[in-house]
Image (cartoon, rainbow, N blue to C red):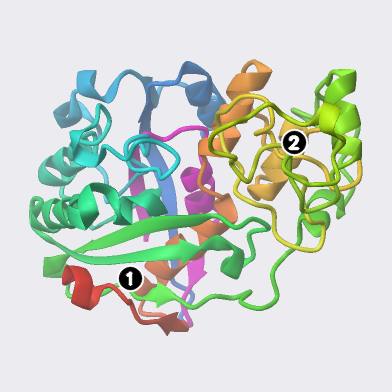
Amino acid sequence: MVFNMGELFCGAGGLAMGARQAHVVTPDNGAFSIRHAWANDIDEWACATYAKNILGGDSNNVINLPVEELNIRELPKIEGFAFGFPCNDYSVVGKQKGLNGKFGSLYTYGVQVLEHHRPAWFVAENVGGLQSANRGHALKSILDDLAAAGPRYLLTPHLYKFEDYGVPQTRHRIIIVGIRSDLGLEFKIPAPTHAGKHVSAREAIESPPIAKDAFNHEFTEHSPRVVEMLDHIPAGENAWYEGIPEQLRLNVKRAKLSHIYRRLDPDKPAYTVTGTGGGGTHVYHWSESRALTNRERARLQTFEDSFEFIGPKESVRKQIGMAVPPHGAKVIFEALLKTFAGVEYEYVTSEWFERFGYR
């Protein structure tokens, strides 16, 4: 069976690439996979990247519009649906306005897709901070709306720690998997594959070496002062390291964020790669006094070197940082396909049933 999948807030295509890479073959040679039907995003460059890498250059089925202007009823029929609804109002880095923020209610457009198209399954993604937004009420409200949509859906929400699944980065994201309740199937959380044996930043970036002419591998030019400051910061430390000479320290009186000019520990997964932020937020090499290139960041996000991001350098940085790691997405989509194929797999139980009423 091939599921036609639609996607809102598609970005550069992290979820999509994971879905595309997921394949399941049953003992009787039945094949289960996912094919992309349409996608939507407000970011022009992200849409161009998605079209090139996910749809082989076909931009006809990537709709570059604000989701509020999208005619959901006219979109082609789908059996599967994915949406990483905007996290701006849920991230702990921001003010966590939650449902009261400008972006907090955009998940409701995903609910509209479920109401009208009634797909067999959906996968929704957001930041871990969604748990605490509006004192936990935001997540409960979102779960209730998704469960009640259209034909009703059986939900399995979980906070995935992607480093435990082989992603070389400590990236924690809430993934909500829903299956139409009339199908009699229940998704189970795939068991971690790399707990206690994480992939390190060094392994991700150096093995194999990145070709000099690789896509999106431009180096950043730093001021001499920044380079000199980085020279005094050991691997794993940041701009607040005590060994930095006084004249090179940052003049910051208030909050001292831990990721500012933080150098990677080469023997551990990277800290979370972000899509926006000023100086000091670009992720820094453990031995070379420089920020990582976009290609190196993409490796930490598990994008293959053949995946070409389209757009100016800062747009590419944003696309990479906002994406779901394709490898992490693949694990979830493969488990979903196995659920429909009747193929057993190792799983863990949800810790959220008592808190939210969903498994």
Question: Is 310 displayed left or right of 355 in the figure?
Answer: right
Q: Is residue 202 visible?
A: yes
Which residue: 70% across, 59% down?
A: 269
Residue 295, numbered circle: 2
Residue 52: percent from the left, percent from the top? 58, 27
Marks 1,2: beta carbons within 8 A: no
The amino acid type of the residue labelled 1 equals: Phe
| Nearest to the observer: residue 321 or residue 310 | 321
Which residue: 43% across, 81% down?
A: 347
Which residue: 70% across, 75% down?
A: 197
In the depicted structure, whether residue 345 falls above or below residue 215: below
68 part of magenta stretch: no
Question: Is 291 displayed left or right of 60 in the figure?
Answer: right
Residue 323: percent from the left, percent from the top? 52, 41
The amino acid type of the residue labelled 2 equals: Arg
| Nearest to the observer: residue 306 or residue 162 | 162
Residue 209: percent from the left, percent from the top? 90, 47
Residue denoted by label 1: 340
Question: Is 200 displayed left or right of 170 in the figure?
Answer: right
How crowded pointer 1 is (Cα within 10 Å; few <14, some 14-19, many 20+) is rated as some
How crowded pointer 2 is (Cα within 10 Å; few <14, some 14-19, many 20+) is rated as many
Residue 353: percent from the left, percent from the top? 22, 76
Q: Is residue 56 visible?
A: no
Residue 174, numbered circle: none
Query: The magenta stretch spans which residues?
Result: 1-27
Image quarter of residue 182: bottom left
| Nearest to the observer: residue 250 or residue 267 | 250
